[in-house]
Amino acid sequence: MIVVNETLKVIKQRRSIRNFKGEQIKEEELQAVLEAGLHAPNAGNQAWHFTVIQNRELLERLNSAAKEAAKEMNIEQLRALGNNEKFNCLYGAPTLIIVSGNEQAPMPLDADCAAATQNLLLAAESIELGSCWIFFVLLAFNSPQGSELRKALKIPEGYKPHSSAVLGYKKVATVNVPDRKPNLITYIR
């Protein structure tokens, strides 16, 4: 018998959404998602900071800066996206949350920031918001505009952007849930 509950359903149905309606999410939805992020497991120091961007001009600046940085990378796939005029790394989502980590924290931040981001994504799905984990936009901080963007986004001194997620209302409510690959679990009992 397989155990099923609401949490497990949300985990199984969550998908990366890359097609959003134009309207902004409600403040209470944003706060619910952020609260879930704050309750993520961490190495005991909660050494993260969330930056919420809902300003369309800043979102476009981030997209443009990320694409400029991608054009200079040695990874062909990223260069191609950077050169694609139609590509928007935020997929038109009205909200972006950047999860930054305190670089002075004694424990590895990648795991803490990843756990917080996963909580943001699961919380979004649980209240029927679309979401997508976005790496590409972080390239903006490696662009010539990187330090200027950090200031504009009020990222605290000593914090580095580690992950990010976009949020918005899904244009399409039903998303295909593909089968999982076989043979990804080994049991040693």
Image: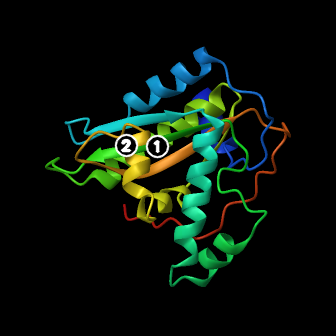
Q: Quadrant of residue 166?
A: top right
Q: Give the answer, above or below, for where 173 lies relative to 69.
A: above
Amino acid type at circle 1 is Ile
Q: Nearer the viewer, mark 2 or mark 1?
A: 2
Q: Quadrant of residue 152?
A: top left
User: Is the residue under label 1 in contact with that under label 2 (CB below 8 Å)?
Assistant: no
Compare marks 2 and 1 and give the one earlier in the sequence.
Answer: 1
Question: Residue 32 versus residue 4: which sits nearer the camera?
Answer: 32
Q: Is residue 73 left or right of residue 171?
A: left
Q: Mark 2 sits on what residue?
A: 151
Question: Residue 59 versus residue 134: which sits nearer the camera?
Answer: 59
Q: Is residue 2 visible?
A: no
Q: Is residue 161 visible?
A: yes
Question: Residue 84 versus residue 47: which sits nearer the camera?
Answer: 84
Query: Within 10 angstroms of label 2, few (less than 14), some, or many (20 or more) residues?
Result: few
Q: Which residue is at 56% across, 72% downward?
A: 70
Q: Give the answer, above or below, for where 127 lies relative to 10.
A: above
The N terminus: image quadrant: top right
Query: Within 10 angstroms of label 1, few (less than 14), some, or many (20 or more) residues?
Result: many
Image location of residue 135, percent across then percent down: 52, 58
Q: Give the answer, above or below, for where 135 lies relative to 82.
A: above
The C terminus: image quadrant: bottom left
Q: Give residue 81's mark.
A: none
Amino acid type at circle 2 is Lys
Secondary structure beneath dot 1 equals: strand
Q: Which residue is at 42% across, 64% downward?
A: 142
Image location of residue 16, percent across then percent down: 68, 50
Q: Mark 1 sits on what residue?
A: 98
